[in-house]
Image (tube, helix red, strand yellow):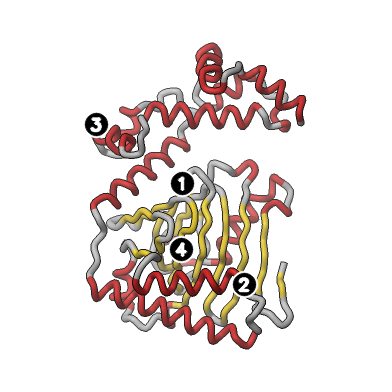
Amino acid sequence: MWLTGLVLHESVFRTTDLPVNDRFEAWAERMGRTHAPMRLSSDRVADYRGSQRVIALGDVVLWPATFDHLVFRRTPQLIRQSDPETYHLSLLLKGEGAADWGRQQAAYRMNDFHINSSSRSWEVFTGSEPVTVLGVEVPRALVAVPGRRADQVLGSLLSGREGIGALLSQFLRQLVADTSSYQPSDAPRLGTVVADLVTALFAHTVDADLRLPPETRERTLTLHVKTFIHRHLDDPDLTPAAIAAAHHVSRSYLYRLFQAEGLTVASYIRDQRLENARRDLVDPRLRDLPIRAVAARWGYPRAAEFTRAFRTAYGLPPSELREQALTEA
C-alpha cells in the first residue's frame, strides 16, 4: 500500500494481510525488491510474520521493519544477474543478528549498524526471536569514499551509540518516527543528509582502522550454532559432539560459548524442541496430527521420552495441553 499526497512517498507491507501460505514467498519478494535479489530461508515459513515501511528519499531509501527469524544469502550468481550497486545499512533496534562474508564475520547487538554491499556475496542471519531493524539503501556513487576503502567497512563493528554512528542513528530514528512534517520536495534533501552521514561514518571508520573485538567472533559463532540447531531439531542424533564437529570446534569450546549465556548445549536443544512441539500442539490447523508425529517432528522418536520431558517443562502432558488449547480456541 502506497501513501502519497503532501507527505513523503511511503509504502507499507504486512504479511498478515495475506493468506498464511503466501506470506513467506511474498516477504522474500519484498526483501528482494527492497535491497537486491537474495535467497531467503527461515524456520517460520509456515506462518511468516513481517511488516515493513519503505520511505523514498530520492535515490536513498529507508525501510523500518520487524520480522521473524530469517537467513539472507546473496550469492555470486545473483550478483551477476542483478546488482543495483548499493550499500546497505541496518540499525538493529531489537533482537540479534550476524553476517558472514567468508573471511570476515560480524555479530550485532542492539544499536549496532550492520553494513553490506549488493556487489559482494554474503550471508546474514537473525536470531530465533523476531528482530526490528531500520534499513538504509544508499547508492555506492553517493558515498564519497573510494570504493576499495569504503568496502573495508564491511565486517567492522559500527556502533550507533556514539560518535558519528550516534548522529546517523538519531537522525534516522527521528525521521522515521514521524514523517508527517515533511513534504515530497524535502525527500531529495533528506536523502542527501543521510548519504553525507553514511559517508562520514565510512570515512571515520577506515581512517581509524577499527578492529573487531575478540568477543565478536564468539557471538557470531554462537549465532551460527543456534541457527544450525534450529535447522536440525528434527534429527534425534543432534548432539553437542555432532554440532562441534559441524563447526570445526572442540566440545569444550562449544560448551564455553553457551556457558557465556548461562546455558548448556543440551538444555538449549531440549528447550527449542519442546517449545516448537508446544506451538504445534496448540495450533488448531494441526489438531489432526498425532502427538507421536509432533514429537518425531521435533527430534523425539520415542513418545514416552517426549511425554516425560514435556510434563517436566510445562507441568502437564502434551495431550492435556492440546485439549485445553483446542477447547479455548
Would you name the residue on which mark 1 appears? 127
Residue type at numbered disc 4: Leu
Give the CA distance from mark 4 to mark 2: 17 Å
Q: Amino acid at mark 3?
A: Ser
Q: Is residue 67 visible?
A: yes
Q: Nearer the viewer, residue 123 or 252?
A: 252
Mark whose residue sits in front, 1 or 4:
4
Give the mark toward the camera: 3 or 4: 4
Q: How far is mark 1 from mark 2, CA to CA?
A: 28 Å
User: Residue at the location (37% across, 40% down)?
Assistant: 225
Answer with mark 3 or mark 4, whichever residue precedes in sequence: 4
Contact between marks 1 and 2 (CB within 8 A): the answer is: no
- Label 3: few (<14), some (14–19) or many (≥20) C-alpha neighbours in 10 Å: few
Which residue reaches farthest top?
Answer: 304
Rendered view: 60 above or below 251: below
Q: Locate the N terminus and report the quarter of the image it occupies.
A: bottom right
Going from N to C along the chain, the mark reached first, 1 or 2, is: 1
Left or right: 206 in relation to 199: left
Q: Which residue is mark 4?
A: 91
Q: Residue at x 67, y 69 (%)?
A: 11
Up the image or down, 299 lies above or below 226; here it is: above
Circle 2 sits on which residue?
178
Residue 245 visible, this orientation: no
Q: Tell me the residue that label 3 is attached to.
A: 252
SS for tag 4? strand
Element carrying mark 2: loop
For label 1, the SS is loop
The image shows residue 15 at horizontal and vertical percentages of 67, 53
- Tell me: 40 left or right of 180: left
